[in-house]
Image (cartoon, rainbow, N blue to C red):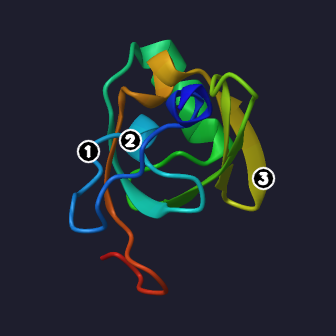
Amino acid sequence: MLRQSLFRARRPRTAIAENLSDLALGEEAVVEALDLPESSAQRLQELGFIPGGRVVAARSAPGGDPRVYRVDGAEVALRRETASRVKVRDGGPGGDGR
């Protein structure tokens, strides 16, 4: 029972992720907007988090924070606080999400 509480419950596939931190491991989405201060948003855009760009929740640290995301051919670790401010839409399995 304790072991189950350590793992984040998976959302039903019909639920739509609203921000990057909502993605389940392995789930893909398309970046919609960055709700961050300009300097932070600019840095994330330099790393590939641009509107229309695809991102995949790759893996996470043992405690779940930070989490690694695959974007634009690279892997980037983001804290949950930052990831929660990156707005996304469903990328769909194998689709282009556009």
- Callout 3–callout 1 Cβ contact below 8 Å: no
Q: Which residue is mark 1?
A: 18
- Quick one: SS at disc 2? helix
In the image, 91 versus 63, the foreground residue is: 63
Tell us which disc is closer to us: 1 or 2. Answer: 2
Label 2 to label 3, Cα distance in Å?
A: 20 Å
Q: Residue furthest bottom?
A: 94
In the image, taking residue 45 as reference, residue 71 lies left or right, namely right
- Quick one: SS at disc 1? loop
Label 3 to label 1, Cα distance in Å?
A: 22 Å
Q: Which residue is mark 2?
A: 22
Answer with the quarter of the image where residue 72 lies: bottom right
Tell me the kind of residue under disc 3.
Answer: Ala
N-terminal-most mark, 3 or 1 = 1
In the image, 78 versus 10, the foreground residue is: 10
Percent of width and height locating residue 33: 31, 41
In the image, taking residue 7 as reference, residue 81 lies left or right, namely left
Tell me the kind of residue under disc 1.
Answer: Glu
Mark 1: few/some/many CA within 10 Å (<14, 14-19, 20+): some
Percent of width and height locating residue 69: 65, 46
N-terminal-most mark, 2 or 3 = 2
Q: Which residue is mark 3?
A: 74
